[in-house]
Image (cartoon, rainbow, N blue to C red):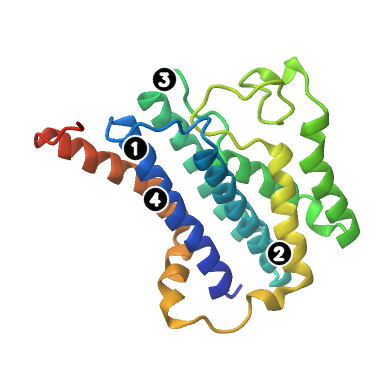
Amino acid sequence: MNRSDRLDALRGLAIVWMAAFHFCFDLNHFGWLRENFYRDPFWTLQRTAIVSLFLFCAGGGQALAVLGGQGARRFWRRWAQVAGCALAVSAGSALMFPNSWISFGVLHGIAVMLVLLRMGLSRAAAPWLLALAAAALLVPQLLSHAWFDTRWTNWVGLVTHKPITEDYVPVLPWLGVMLLGFAVSRRWPSLWAGTLARPLRPLAVLGRWSLSFYMLHQPVLIGLLMGAQALGLRPH
């Protein structure tokens, strides 16, 4: 399957935005900033936009993979990498945030949604895909039950309140965003065809290594801030 520079660049943009967001979050965690990342719309809306970009690109990538005839072996190899990294994120977050560790974040969500796509949704006709996307986005606004509030069940998304966790990307409503990315890219693959302007090419390179960057950027950023504190630099 050939890569799409344009789709990779969009994913790269999401990564740069994510890294900047996480750096601000880390500055806040270590006391260099005083911001409410959990309630302030300036930060919560950014998070929503970043996750939406990631999932839209993931759906688009799957559409191009299906159109390009990607085999099951290649799909499951990549899926195993995503799932393995999701488990690593859970373990790492449990060490740093024992009271709000990540049990179902963005990588967990992508892993489950990719299976749903691969196991049947990718074969649905466009009207059905769009209907399912709309339902996925709307149902959590209309239905909820306390049974879904545990860590074992909140991955569905029909919770009565957001769980205490550093990252939470449940199947509903976020499957709707991935389905939109899949439907749009399958219907209009030409959106991602063609060359990329030279200034944007670094974003495409970054987008091809999105999973590696995702796993490495936080340890690097946190390490730099811990190093700065060890050198005697302290927030005022």
Disc 2 to disc 3, C-alpha distance: 37 Å
Counting other residues with Cα less than 10 Å from the Cα at mark 4, is it few (<14), some (14-19), or many (20 or more)? few
Image quadrant where one finds the N terminus: bottom right
Mark 4 or mark 1: name the one nearer the start of the chain: 4
Q: Nearer the viewer, mark 3 or mark 4?
A: 4
Label 4 SS: helix
Residue located at (64% from left, 21% from top): 152
Q: x, y (%) of residue 136? A: 79, 42
| Mark identifier at residue 63 | 2
Is 150 situated left or right of 180 in this image?
A: left
In percent of width and height, residue 32 lies at: 27, 35
Which residue is at 62% across, 56% downward? 58
- The answer to whether residue 57 shows anywhere in this view is yes
Q: Secondary structure at mark 2?
A: helix
In the picture of the structure, the residue carrying the numbered disc 3 is: 98
Please provide percent x and percent y for residue 46. 53, 46
**Residue that carries the numbered disc 1 in the rendered image:** 26
Sequence order check: which comes first, mark 1 or mark 3?
Answer: 1
- Identify the amino acid type marked 3: Pro
Say what amino acid the circle numbered 2 marks.
Answer: Ala
- Asked if marks 3 and 4 touch (Cβ < 8 Å), the reply is no
Mark 2 and mark 3 in contact? Answer it, CB < 8 Å: no
Q: Nearer the viewer, mark 1 or mark 3?
A: 1
Q: Which amino acid type is shown beneath numbered disc 1?
A: Asp
Q: Which residue is mark 4?
A: 20
Q: Earlier along the polypeptide chain: callout 2 or callout 3?
A: 2
Please identify, in this view, whether the residue under mark 2 or under mark 1 is nearer the observer. Answer: 1
Which of the two discs, 2 and 1, labels the residue nearer the N terminus? 1
Q: Nearer the viewer, mark 4 or mark 2?
A: 4
